[in-house]
Image (cartoon, grey):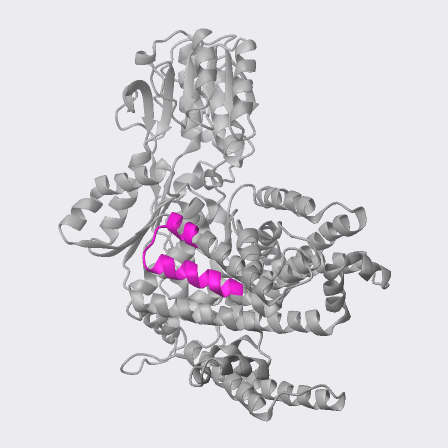
Amino acid sequence: MTDVATTATGPAEEPRRPSIRRLVAATEIDLRLFGMVAALIGMLLVFGIITGGRILSASNLVTMSVQAASVAIIATGMVIIIVSRNIDLSVGSIVGVTAMTYAMLMTGTGILTDLLGRGHPLTWVIALAIGLSVGALIGALQGFIVAYVGVPSFIVTLGGLLAFRGVVWIMSGGAGVAGLDLTFQILGGGPQGSIGGTLSWVVGIIVCVGIVGLLAYSRRQRRKFGFPVRPVWAEWLLGVVGCAVTLGLVFIANSYLWPPALAERFAQEHGITIPPGGLRIESGIPWPILLLVIVALVMSFIANRRRFGRYIYAIGGNPEAAELAGINTRATVMKAFILMGVLCALSGAIAAARLNAASLDVGRGYELYVIAATVIGGTSLAGGIGTIPGAILGALVMATLAYGLQYIGLSSPVQDIAAGFVLIVAVGLDSWNRRRAG
Amino acid sequence: MNPRRAASLLPVLAIVLAACQPAASESPTGGESPAGGGGSAEGCLVGVSWNNYQQERWAKADEPAMQAVIEAAGGEYTKTDANDSEEQQITDIDSLINQEVDVLIVLAKSTTSILPAVDAAEEAGIPMIGYDRLIARESVFYITFDNQGVGTAMAEHMLAAVPTGNYVVIKGHVDDPNADFLRDGMDLGGLQDAVDAGDVTIVYEEYTDGWQTEVAQTNMETALQENNNEVDAVLSENDSMAIGVVAALADQGLDGVVPVSGQDGDAANLNNVARGLQLVDVWKDAFGLGQTAGHVAVQMCQGVEYADLKAPDDLGDHVAPEAGVDAQTFDADGTSVWSITLKPTPITQENLDLPIDLGWIEKDVACDGAEADVAACQ
């Protein structure tokens, strides 16, 4: 959906100005998303020019998106929370607690290792299940206090931000824990945590077929119920562009080859002779990105197609009306917090797997990045408005900016200034645009 | 505050006392003081103002070592915890003064906001020890580790292992003076000379927001990307950042290939030393620091002048001050204070037995997954 807009700029530039609008209208692309994709591409181009193209290498792009994944996954949940007229400041601390949970279960002297023995194939599944449950429990606790006790979510989760960071300290006795299960580490990405070239093509083709299938299905449904349909050329354009972008991204991921040192070690361990010119192993799509794509699809489905999602938007639009219409607003809000807790736990798994450790400060400051990403992505802090793809794009914009500024060697205070500036400009432009439109 | 300084430790108290304080645990109450102090400190009350006692380190290492020496000499020990608050610490010190302590030991949260309390103690004529953190007053005796020496030890070990090549320097938080202090120490340890001689090129050097593991990881990923993985050594200023560095190296198959430094003696990092993923972990033995403070407090009880105070004779060789047991002058931004500066201990695979034997870390934690040839883990 977001990728669709990416290359739509290409053909759109040829005809004269007014027809861009007509094209956008015909394809029913969200203008805001379109603008954000354009901004993202613009930013990449600027950094590309500054670094002489080096930052646009496959390995850089993959690293950059993996760095965005943890925040993006939580941002999809934050959309739901903010749309329901709540806020969750405790996300970073929930990430910390769950990351510490995984680490303490799986490290060499951890509980699961004691019970099952080192390297047991079920270790990571059990640990993940426990971690996700811990996230859900924390979410349920906070959601209950917000929805049923009636304490404002700002206060409850501000308390959670402090309290759960304290829990991390007490769990660990004030020290980081390192050395996780080998299978679990795959969740963290990197060449060994990617699905490989062939599988990546399979995933790409499935997504491609999915896009075409969805377009065809929605056209049939619209016709059946007498809704207006897009012109045929617009359907074709969306399908072709969507497929091209998907396969293009897979191509980029696949052109990131295993680093020579890693490939050599792999060859030695598996008794493979290294061919002249080195071993070529395609990394493919990293697991964190695959998880992000799955989360994005599931969350979009929940937000747009499930009763729960529609209730959330109804509550955000007008809580009293929603209540009067018979929506159980309390249960709905509590569910939103549980969902958020689970997403934080998933993000915590990625962070812990990436570090192969849980330090005391895993997730610290996430709340700010997540809320910034969500708001840049067009979610209104007043509630009722916001989209999942927007929040993910927002996270990508933030991560690209941070990575780019860091890559060209700007110091961290300057990076902070730039990030703050972009946040205000992005939201400012958005509200200006909305006023003008509306 | 400063979670980064949260030393990780899993000490066994019995071993601690046995290893650190043989004299203390054996000497009868009211008899000879532990070593070299001369005479007892019967009835002397020593008050300690901890800044953040909730960090495991203080309760498990510093305090018992300190307390053992004081009580062995017949003194009494009392403490307060400021719970990481500057205001609370000032109140704490006032209350210790009101309890008429004979010696005051202060682990200051802030080296400046503590000064009003220091003035009050000074007026009450109470001798003071600045423990682990500098208080720039002549009235405060300073007991610490050679922090610059930590950077020096890192650089020396790294240059011995990798005399030439591309170096990455992962520094601490930008406005923490300690980050630059450590960096200066690296230069003293031969890094500057190696750069000048053209042997070493520093290909990436960056501060790390809040000394955070995740930030160090992303910075290290950038360092590798920018240099096509052509990195031969990484000088990380502490242990929590070293974890992030090793994770970034592992993604490129370079863990255990590119040596990494660290400091603090965190359990995970000592384990990484055993696994061959970290070359050196510079450890500041908190038992030794506590023992020294206890010993100095006992001498203060007996009215020994600051200039004549001595470190214990029976300090382990790994921490014994290089300048000898006598107090030295220490220049703190123009104020000259009396001080005893202990030596930090670089831990490598060769001497990993030291923190294990002293009870800083349990053997099975340190040795989990250790390389086959690590003697300490046999």
A425 over B359 or under it: above or below = below
- Can residue B34 be seen from the camera position used here? no
The residue lying at 56 percent from left, 92 percent from top is A233
Placement of the C terminus of chain A among the 4 image quadrants = bottom right
Magenta segment: does it hold A415? yes
Placement of the N terminus of chain A among the 4 image quadrants = bottom right
Q: What is the tally of numbered marks visible in this picture? A: 0
* Residue B288 x, y percent position in the rendering: 40, 29
* Residue A129 x, y percent position in the rendering: 66, 62
Magenta segment: does it hold B337? no
- Can residue B120 be seen from the camera position used here? yes
The residue lying at 48 percent from left, 53 percent from top is B368
| Main secondary structure found in the magenta portion | helix
Q: Is residue B231 left or right of residue B194?
A: right
* Residue A54 x, y percent position in the rendering: 31, 69
The residue lying at 72 percent from left, 46 percent from top is A152
| Residue furthest bottom in the image | A232
Q: In this view, does A225 lie to the left or right of A8?
A: right
Between B215 and B242, which is closer to the camera in this rendering?
B215
The residue lying at 78 percent from left, 57 percent from top is A319
- Magenta segment boundaries in residue numbering: A394-418
Between B210 and A368, which is closer to the camera in this rendering?
A368
* Residue A181 x, y percent position in the rendering: 53, 62
